Amino acid sequence: MTETVRIDSDESFSRFLRAVDGLHDALLHEIVILHPGCVMANGSMVGDTRLPNARLVFQSQFEDIVAVQVDFKRVSTFAFDFTNRLNFRAEFKPGRVRLYQAGHSNEPSFEICAAEMEYKLLGKEAWGPTYRMVRGELLVEDTFRDKL
C-alpha cells in the first residue's frame, strides 16, 4: 500500500485522481515544508538557497486507505486557500508541475509549483505515531494530558 507513484503527466495525474476519488470527502490533515538547509552553531547557513520540498497529507474517507500523502520536490511556489474546496487541476512542463487547488487559475495564491510531484496511499500503518489518524472519537494523546 505504501508504493510511491510519480505524477508527471496528465495521464498519471488522472490515475491519481481516480485512485483517491478526487480526494472527495478527504480532510487536509497536514502540510509540511521540508527545507534542506540548516543553520550551523556559528550562525552560518548551509543549503539555504536550495528550494524546499513539501508534503500534504489528506485523511481519506476509505476504510483501507487511511491517508493520501502527496510529496513535492523543489517547490518554488506554495500557496493554499483553506476556505476553498478541493478541485485539483495540474499543468505539466518538462521539469515542472503546477498544481491548482480549485481548477486552473491565474490567481497565484492558489497554487503549488514544483519540479516533481508524487503520492503514496497509506494504510493502517498511518495510525502510528507519525500521523495520529483517528477514526471516530477525537482522542487526546497521553503526551499532552499532563499539560492540560
Image (cartoon, grey):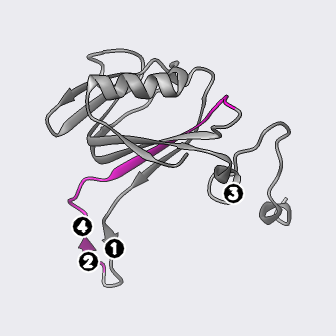
Residue 148 occupies quadrant? bottom right
Foreground of the two, 63 or 26:
63
Residue 44 — which label?
2
Callout 4: 10 Å neighbours few (<14), some, many (20+)?
Answer: few
- Whichever of callouts 2 and 3 sits on the residue coming sooner in the sequence is 2
N-terminal of the two: label 1 or label 3?
1
Residue for point 27% across, 42% down? 116
Residue furthest left as drawn = 94
**Left of 14 or right of it: where is 136?**
right
User: Disc 1 and disc 4: Cα gap in Å?
Assistant: 9 Å
Nearest to the eye among marks 2 and 3: give it: 3
- Residue in the picture at 33% in, 29% down: 12
Q: Are marks 1 and 2 in contact (CB under 8 Å)?
A: yes
- Type of the residue with mark 4: Gly
Q: Which residue is mark 4?
A: 47
Report the magenta residues as a range: 43-62
Closer to viewer: mark 1 or mark 4 = 4
Q: Position of residue 30 (x, y in %)?
A: 56, 44
Q: Is residue 15 magenta?
A: no
Residue indicated by mark 1: 39
Q: Secondary structure at mark 2?
A: loop
Amino acid type of the residue that numbered disc 2 sits on in the rendered structure: Ser
